[in-house]
């Protein structure tokens, strides 16, 4: 089997972003953060190569040169930025206070356990935080704290699955797939936006 995954890079004041869309569904399946495009692409290629061995599918990563000329991809890009900026809060189409449901996404990666953790993370409110232990308790596996930490670290949908809101119980910033400094920047960004928009 073969499948095409479209990708493109976009910029935000906090960081560069690489988005990847599953062509056959038109949904976001991969989002990564960083300013080095070559590194982001290489990491994505490695992730899809590993996925290929599990699904027995050859993935072709195709760059979209201009999202403005690709209606589906432009829709995904706008949705993603709206979540990052916490726009459209309180409108009927928003399904949760975290804003994550505003993006059309689907899981291509992860075990059933990891997807369960990621789904629970989408319930953490914008500007809020949660501990690994609290997530473990919410999925009815209170002793699986280490497993939760591993799942958080394997997240392939930055921002959409807000793993940056998950912290160690000691209150420290903890590790982050895209670096602790980026995690701090995202949390501060959300805190400031929440205060500006007077979101409870």
Image: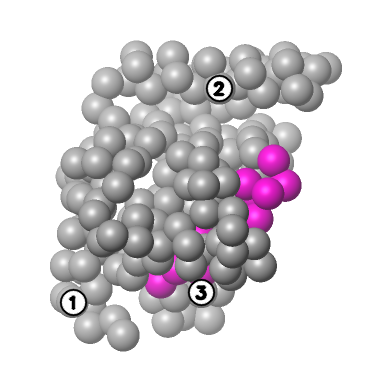
- Furthest toward the front, the residue is 143
Q: Decide which of tag 2 and tag 3 comes sooner along the chain.
A: 2
Residue pictured at 58% horizontal, 39% vertical: 29
In this view of the protein, can residue 26 be seen by the observer?
no
Residue pictured at 59% horizontal, 64% vertical: 142
Q: Decide which of tag 3 and tag 1 comes sooner along the chain.
A: 3
Instruction: Specify few, some or many for label 3: CA neighbours under 10 Å numbering under 14, 14-19, or 20 or more.
Output: some
Residue annotated with mark 1? 195
71 left or right, relative to 50? left
Q: Which residues are magenta?
A: 111-126
Which is closer to the viewer, label 1 or label 2? 2
Q: Decide which of tag 1 and tag 2 comes sooner along the chain.
A: 2
Separation of residues labelled 3 and 1 (CA atoms):
18 Å
Element type where label 1 sits in the image = helix
Q: Is residue 158 magenta?
A: no
Query: In what quadrant of the picture does the C terminus appear?
Result: bottom left
Residue annotated with mark 3? 96
Residue pictured at 57% horizontal, 68% vertical: 137
Residue annotated with mark 2? 47
Across and down, in percent, residue 64 comes to 48, 25
Across and down, in percent, residue 93 comes to 54, 74
5 or 172: nearer the eye? 172
96 left or right, relative to 127? right
């Amino acid at each position: 089997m073969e499948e095409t995954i479209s990708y493109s890079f976009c910029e935000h004041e906090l960081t560069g972003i690489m988005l990847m869309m599953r062509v056959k569904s038109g949904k976001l399946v991969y989002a990564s953060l960083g300013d080095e495009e070559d590194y982001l692409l290489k990491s994505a290629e490695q992730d899809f190569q590993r996925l290929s061995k599990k699904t027995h599918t050859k993935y072709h990563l195709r760059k979209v040169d201009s999202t403005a000329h690709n209606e589906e991809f432009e829709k995904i890009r706008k949705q993603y930025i709206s979540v990052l900026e916490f726009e459209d809060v309180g409108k009927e189409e928003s399904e949760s206070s975290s804003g994550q449901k505003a993006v059309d996404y689907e899981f291509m990666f992860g075990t059933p356990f990891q997807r369960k953790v990621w789904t629970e993370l989408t319930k953490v409110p914008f500007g809020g935080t949660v501990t690994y232990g609290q997530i473990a308790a919410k999925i009815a596996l209170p002793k699986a704290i280490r497993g939760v930490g591993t799942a958080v670290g394997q997240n392939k949908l930055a921002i959409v699955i807000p793993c940056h809101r998950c912290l160690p119980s000691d209150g420290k910033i903890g590790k982050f797939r895209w670096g602790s400094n980026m995690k701090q920047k995202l949390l501060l960004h959300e805190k400031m936006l929440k205060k500006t928009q007077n979101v409870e």
